[in-house]
Image: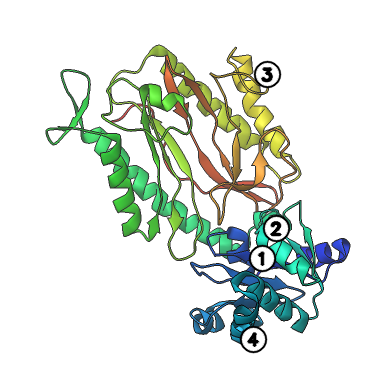
C-alpha cells in the first residue's frame, strides 16, 4: 500500500531533524504503517525522505526485502553488530550499531514517537545522536486520514463484523426463558461466554479475529467497558460491542447493538429511543470542518434536553452519558480523530464511530454504534445493520 508521507517531510523540516526513528514491533500501529512490514519482534525503522529498516539479526531480512515498503533493508551484521556486542556488551553494542546505521544514511538527529524506548534514546545520545521526542505524534495524525485502499480494508472488516453480530442476535433469538428468568439455549443457560464464542467463530470464518468483545447484560451493561460474564437474563438490556481486526489487512471495524429478550422496563425503552435520537443528531452534524467536539455536543444536547446526566454538564457524573461520542478507527481500534470534548475538525477520509449510550446500574445500559467515513460533502455510513431492541 502506498502512503503519503509529505506531512512527515514537513514535520522533519519544521523540527529541524534529519530523520524519524521507531524502535518497536509491528503491533505498534505507527511502526507497521511506516515500515509496511509485520514482524513480532522489535526492529528499527528510519524515515529521512525514504524508509530504511534495520534488524539486529537476519531472521526477518528476506521477508522484509519482499514485503516491506522500505528502500533499504539492512542487518546488524552490515554494521559490525557481533563485534560491537563482544566489545561493548549487548545494550551498548546494539546502540552503536543503530548509530552506525543512522550515519550511513546521513542522519545525526532524529525525532521519535511519544512512546519510544528510553534505553534506546539514551544509548543513541551517548553515541552523539540527537534524539528529540515528537510530542504531537505526527504519524498517528497521518494515519487518521485513510486512503481509498485503507477504506476498503475497514469496510471489509465491517462486513465481517455484521456477520458476527447476526450470529449473536440469532443465538439470543433462539433462546427460551427459564423459570428463574435466565436465557436457555439447547437445555443450558445461555452465557455471555457462549455468545462471545459464536462471535469469534463467525469472525474467523470471515478472515477476522479479536482479542476480546463485549456481551454485557443488566447491571454489567451499565459499565461501558465491562466485557460481561455468566448467564444472560430475560427482560434486561444486553449490549453487544464487537471490534474485530481483519487478519490480512490488520484494519479494524467497530459496531454496537443493544438487545432485549423479553419485556424491557419502560426506562430501557425510553433510553433506547433517546439513544437512537442522539445517534441521528450526531450523524446529522458530521461533515468536513465540523469538529469532533461539535458532533459530541449534538449527542449531549439530546440527553441533557431529556434531563439526563452527561459528563459535559457534570464531569463527576457516574450515570447517564459517561463517555465520548466516538473515536477514529484503523490499524488501532481507538485512534484519531477524537469525537469528544477537544475533538478537532473532521476531514474527508476520517473514519469514526458514533456511539452514544446511557448507563445506570439500577436500569442497565444502552449503546448503539455505527461506523462512518467522512466524505467531501458529509459522511458515508459503513454500517448496514438494523437497530431493534426487541428480538424477534
Q: Disc 3 designates what residue?
A: 313
Q: Earlier in the sequence, mark 3 or mark 1?
A: 1
Few, some or many C-alpha atoms within 10 Å of disc 1 (few <14, some 14-19, many ≥20)?
A: many
Residue shown at 58%/59% (left/top)? 29
Quarter holding the C terminus?
top left
Of circles 3 and 4, the one toward us is: 4
Residue 75 appears in view:
no
Q: Are marks 1 and 2 in contact (CB under 8 Å)?
A: yes
Mark closer to the chain start, 3 or 4: 4
Choose the circle earlier in sequence order: 4 or 2: 4
Cα–Cα span, label 3 and label 1: 40 Å
Can you tell which quarter of the image residue 181 is in? top left
Disc marking residue 113:
2
146 vs 230, nearest the viewer: 230
Residue drawn at point x = 75 percent, y = 44 percent: 345
Residue 200's spot in the image, x, y percent?
33, 50
Q: Are marks 3 and 1 in contact (CB under 8 Å)?
A: no
Circle 1 is placed at which residue position? 22
Percent of width and height locating residue 197: 28, 46
Report the residue marked by disc 4.
Answer: 80
Amino acid at each position: 500500500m502506498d502512503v503519503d508521507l509529505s506531512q512527515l517531510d514537513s514535520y522533519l523540516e519544521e523540527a529541524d531533524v534529519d530523520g524519524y526513528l521507531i524502535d518497536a514491533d509491528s503491533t505498534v500501529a505507527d511502526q507497521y504503517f511506516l515500515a509496511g512490514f509485520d514482524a513480532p519482534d522489535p526492529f528499527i525503522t528510519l524515515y529521512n525522505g525514504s524508509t530504511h529498516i534495520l534488524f539486529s539479526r537476519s531472521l526477518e531480512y528476506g521477508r522484509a526485502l519482499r514485503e516491506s515498503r522500505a528502500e533499504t533493508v539492512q542487518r546488524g551484521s552490515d554494521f559490525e553488530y557481533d563485534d560491537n556486542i563482544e566489545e561493548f556488551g549487548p545494550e551498548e553494542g546494539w546502540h552503536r550499531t543503530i548509530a552506525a546505521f543512522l550515519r550511513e544514511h546521513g542522519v545525526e538527529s532524529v525525532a521519535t514517537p511519544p512512546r519510544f524506548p528510553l534505553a534506546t534514546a539514551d544509548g543513541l545520545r551517548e553515541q552523539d545522536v540527537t534524539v528529540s521526542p515528537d510530542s504531537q505524534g505526527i504519524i498517528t495524525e497521518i494515519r487518521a486520514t485513510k486512503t481509498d485502499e485503507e477504506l476498503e480494508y475497514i469496510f471489509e472488516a465491517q462486513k465481517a463484523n455484521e456477520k458476527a453480530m447476526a450470529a449473536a442476535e440469532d443465538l439470543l433469538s433462539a433462546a427460551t426463558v427459564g423459570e428463574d428468568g435466565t436465557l436457555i439455549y439447547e437445555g443450558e443457560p445461555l452465557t455471555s461466554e457462549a455468545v462471545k464464542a459464536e462471535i469469534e467463530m463467525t469472525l474467523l470464518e470471515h478472515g477476522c479475529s479479536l482479542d476480546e468483545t463485549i456481551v454485557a447484560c443488566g447491571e454489567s451493561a451499565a459499565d461501558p467497558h465491562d466485557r460481561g460474564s455468566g448467564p444472560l437474563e430475560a427482560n434486561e438490556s444486553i449490549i453487544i460491542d464487537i471490534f474485530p481486526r481483519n487478519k490480512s489487512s490488520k484494519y479494524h471495524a467497530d459496531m454496537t447493538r443493544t438487545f432485549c429478550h423479553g419485556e424491557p422496563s419502560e426506562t430501557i425503552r425510553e433510553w433506547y429511543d433517546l439513544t437512537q435520537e442522539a445517534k441521528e443528531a450526531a450523524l446529522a452534524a458530521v461533515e468536513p470542518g465540523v469538529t469532533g467536539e461539535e458532533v459530541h455536543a449534538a449527542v449531549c444536547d439530546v440527553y441533557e434536553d431529556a434531563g439526563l446526566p452527561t459528563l459535559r454538564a457534570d464531569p463527576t457524573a457516574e450515570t447517564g452519558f459517561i463517555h465520548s461520542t466516538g473515536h477514529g478507527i484503523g490499524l488501532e481500534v481507538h485512534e484519531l480523530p477524537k469525537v469528544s470534548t477537544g475533538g478537532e475538525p473532521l476531514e474527508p477520509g476520517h473514519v469514526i464511530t458514533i456511539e452514544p449510550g446511557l448507563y445506570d446500574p439500577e436500569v442497565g445500559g444502552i449503546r448503539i454504534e455505527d461506523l462512518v467515513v467522512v466524505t467531501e460533502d458529509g459522511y458515508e455510513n459503513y454500517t448496514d445493520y438494523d437497530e431493534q431492541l426487541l428480538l424477534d
